[in-house]
Image (cartoon, rainbow, N blue to C red):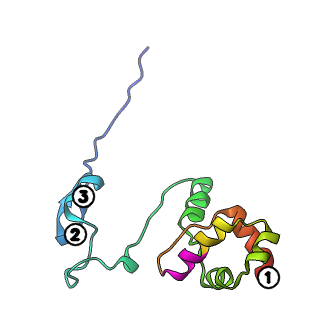
Amino acid sequence: MSQMFLAEYIEEPDLVFGHQREEKDPRIGLRYHGPYHYTTEKEPSPGQIGVGIIGDSTTLTLTKQILERSDSQDLRNRILELAQKEAERLGISRGTLSYLRKNARNEKSFKVYQKVSNRLSTVLS
């Protein structure tokens, strides 16, 4: 006895990229045309590029943790004010403190490992 299985093909829509160019594959579209931006803009504004994530609650939680910045202004200020002796007391090595200070002075985002962030948060609160 055989069962009937009905399948319907739904054609994949084109995605829109920079300069209103269309591609089906996001890797190709981003590589050759860049991210989408409004026709009134010459190029995309990095502060305005959105991200959409689809997944279960575990995936969304982990993705949020990855995307959140770990270098807030409060943390940057604390790093710059942190004395070497205090860092040693917290278990932060001289090399790590040097790395943190160098990056805290810069406007670019940088990664603060969870272990170090936890140690710094004890003195932030």
Residue 76 against residue 64 in the figure, above or below: below
Regarding mark 2 in the picture, which secondary structure is present there?
helix
Regarding mark 1 in the picture, which secondary structure is present there?
loop
Q: Residue at x 24, y 58 (%)?
A: 31
Q: Considering the whole magenta stretch, tell me its main secondary structure.
A: helix
Q: Residue at x 58, y 69 (%)?
A: 99
- Looking at the rendered structure, the kind of residue marked 3 is Arg
Regarding mark 3 in the picture, which secondary structure is present there?
helix
Q: Nearer the viewer, mark 3 or mark 2?
A: 3
Magenta highlight range: 101-106
Which residue is identified by label 1? 125
Q: Quadrant of the C terminus?
A: bottom right
Q: Nearer the viewer, mark 1 or mark 2?
A: 1
Of residues 69 and 17, the one drawn nearer to the viewer in this rendering: 69
Q: Residue 120: x, y in percent?
A: 74, 74
Q: Which mark is residue 18?
A: 2
Mark 3 to mark 2: distance in Å?
10 Å
Residue 95 quadrant? bottom right
Which residue is identified by label 3? 31
Residue that sits furthest to the top in the current view = 1
Task: Name the N-terminal-most of marks 3 and 1.
Answer: 3
- Looking at the rendered structure, the kind of residue marked 2 is Gly
